[in-house]
Image (cartoon, helix red, strand yellow):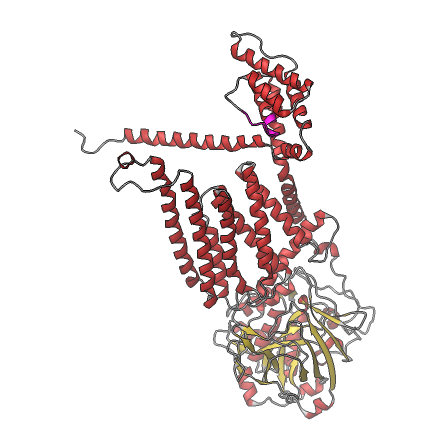
Amino acid sequence: MSGRAKLTVFAALATLLTSWSLSPLVESQAWLLQAALLLAVQSAVGAGARRVPLARSLTVGAQLLVSLLLLALLFAGKVESTGSGPLAYFVTDFGSLFAQGVHDVGEYAIPAPLTDGIQLLLVSGVLLIGLLVDLLAVTARTAAAAGLPLLALYSVAAGLSGGGDASWFSFLLAGCGYLMLLLSEGRDRLAQWGRVFGSSPRGRGAADSGISSGNVRATAPVRFGRRIGAMALGLALAVPAVLPALDDGLLGGPKDGEGAGGSGGTISAVNPLVSLQSNLNAQDNRVVLRYRTDSPQQGDQYLRILALDEFNGSKWEASGRALTDVPQQMPVPPGLGEQVRLGSTEVTTNITASDGYTQRYLPMPYPATSVEIGGKWRFEPVGRTLVGDQLGRDKYQTVQGAEYKVRSLLLKPTAQQLQKAPAPDPAIREEYTKIPDTLPPVVAETARQVTQGTKDDYSRAVKLQDFFAVSGGFRYDTQTASGTGPQAVARFLADKEGFCIHFAFSMAAMSRTLGIPARVAVGFTPGEKQQDGVVNVSMRDAHAWPELYFQGVGWTRFEPTPRSGLNVPDYSRTQAPAPSVSAPAPLPSQGAVQPAPAPSASAECPPALKKLGECGTTAPQQSAAGDGPSVTTVLGWAAVVVAVLGLPLLPLLWRSRVRARRLGTGEVPAAWRELGDAAWDVGVAPDEALSPRGAAVRVVDLGRLEPDAAAAVHRVAGAVERALYAPPGAEVSYAGLADDVLAARAGLLSATGRPARLRALLLPRSATRISWAVTARRSALASAASARLTALRLRLPLRGRG
């Protein structure tokens, strides 16, 4: 095996060993095998292209093209196609899968499930790093610089995984791979100069030591590589220590459930704001839950995940609570009175979670009375939440693929019961009406203005709900910056646009300023019922809503978000509602959405309910065409596809242009050079030591030319001899010079087999002249710069002269 071939192998091996540092980020390491196979193919393509040889740019282009085609073949059909033909796949489907991977990275906790999108990101990232390492170490022959992309890959992986014992093993693998790459390059460089038995002592020249200057220069790259290697390894140790550990999502967020052990433990805060907004803006609408229920009001079947009950002025979050074992029969919900409980109905819901949904908190209707589920779960009594228990080191029970049954109460409080509710328990009021000193005064002032003239907490709550959903002029927009901090609520009240998080957080905060116990619930809206009776809950059904406490009823849902399809509870309506469908309409796909419901055909529908979209037919949603990629995106992807598909044709186009330019001049030397390159393309390498007549005989013999083509070659050679030896001013060219060159080229191509002919057309050997020209130009520029520096030093005055 040649030295360059060994260098290619070690470059791929160094990339693969460094890629092991990404393994803690996902649950399965199946992607490593795919990455290794594709990396091997990419390296083999580079080795073949360098053996041709091709120019460096063409070598990298060939590797990139083959890698893209392999990725397209590997991940074809992973997403539901939105069009037909290869263009639709490259522009829409492949891009959607990549976007899905970016979305999954921000959603899942470490270790994340190996979804198709995340797998695409991992494999393509390893191939990109492998391409850079191969370019620097093998193509450009600077293996020391190849440590920079390897360092970037290891640093990102170590920073995201947060270190740990496994990081030392990953660092050891990455360091060994890089050192083997440096050693391979050093041996290859020394082999080009012969075996070195010694070096010149310090202070002595090469002539004194008896060793040629070539041997002395041969050791310099090795020393240079060792220095860069030591610096890169040192940075690899220092950078992960400086990077913060990102514990929850792959790209940030606090670690949920920290400290939730098998005995006791607590449930800690999770801020769902960022993930909620990303779910609502998701390009794909993946189904995460499916359920069947016997509830007579499926439109009220919200699936609650978590209650955020602590407000510090900057954000809402769940306070730390003690966990207990999951009881067979859950206790009576706090604050629920006998009268409301007797009027309720117990419903049963059978839920199935998708394999890609890895939430630790169990989505279920509120209030649940019992849960049947396998696995290790813990119960938080105050929020009535089930949270996955710790299974091992950094591994917790999740909802992924779970099938469970929940029995819950369908509460039916009336407006009169809520209006006549007694004062809440003092402990409840004290805990759930806390507001920080940093809350802007405008929040409490707005709450008092909106509820002016009301006499009870229920009327104040309905006034706040109508303020946000009907009369306040607010607009639903999922693209609004979510924002945190003490001024977030004040900015929302001023700008009057946001999504469910803003409405829920603001109404809960304003309720607390009025002395009404309030918190925020996070979960899913009821979803969309299918023809077979199964209800699908997708990522864009993610929602947040305020829960207000009323003694005798308990925690009660309100709906201030002005969005089409949300079911406003009967007890919170100011007037009698018109009949509405049980299943809510699907969420809008993305962007700013302000529902504009069409007028109801019924004269009995109140104007307030028309604004909420609770009666009559809602305005039609945007057409499906609006959900597709924009014109700019399509044109951009089309340009990329055209560039990628046209890359193999670049050598052919270059040779055609050069041939036309040479033959268009009518000059004999240019025509002779074109004939030589045409013979070179089919494997007859040029021999500058031969005379024109001898070179013509060699081309005819090695090219196995027919008589007509051979005669054309000899005519061109005769013209070259006349140009070399004819007196000045003599006519050496002739009318059929270009035709003879083309006839000779056609004869050379026809005498070869189909593979050699395709090689001559698509990967011509004469393209090496590009590399020669670039090298000559670079040397000329370096010489000119050196000459100018020398002249500048000579013109500078010398100190102390005279």
Closest to the observer, 268 or 645: 645
Q: Position of residue 583 (x, y in %)?
A: 76, 72
Could one spot residue 721 in this view of the protein? yes
Q: Which residues are magenta?
A: 678-686
Kindly identify the residue that appears in the image at 71 percent across and 47 percent down. Answer: 86
Vertical side of 716 occupied by 275: above or below: below
Instruction: Tell me the residue at 73%/84% (across/down).
Output: 412
Say which of 249 and 647 sits in front. Answer: 647
Count the labels in the image.
Answer: 0
| Residue 448 in view, yes or no | no
In which quarter of the view is residue 518 placed? Answer: bottom right
Drawn side of residue 182 relative to residue 610, left or right:
left
Residue 387 image position (x, y, % from top left): 59, 78
Question: Please, which residue is most extreme toward the left here?
Answer: 802
Query: Which of the pair 296/75 is nearer the observer?
Result: 75
The residue depicted at 55 percent of the width and 73 percent of the height is: 395
Q: Quadrant of the C terminus?
A: top left
Q: Is residue 679 in the magenta section?
A: yes
Image coords of residue 540 (percent x, y): 67, 66
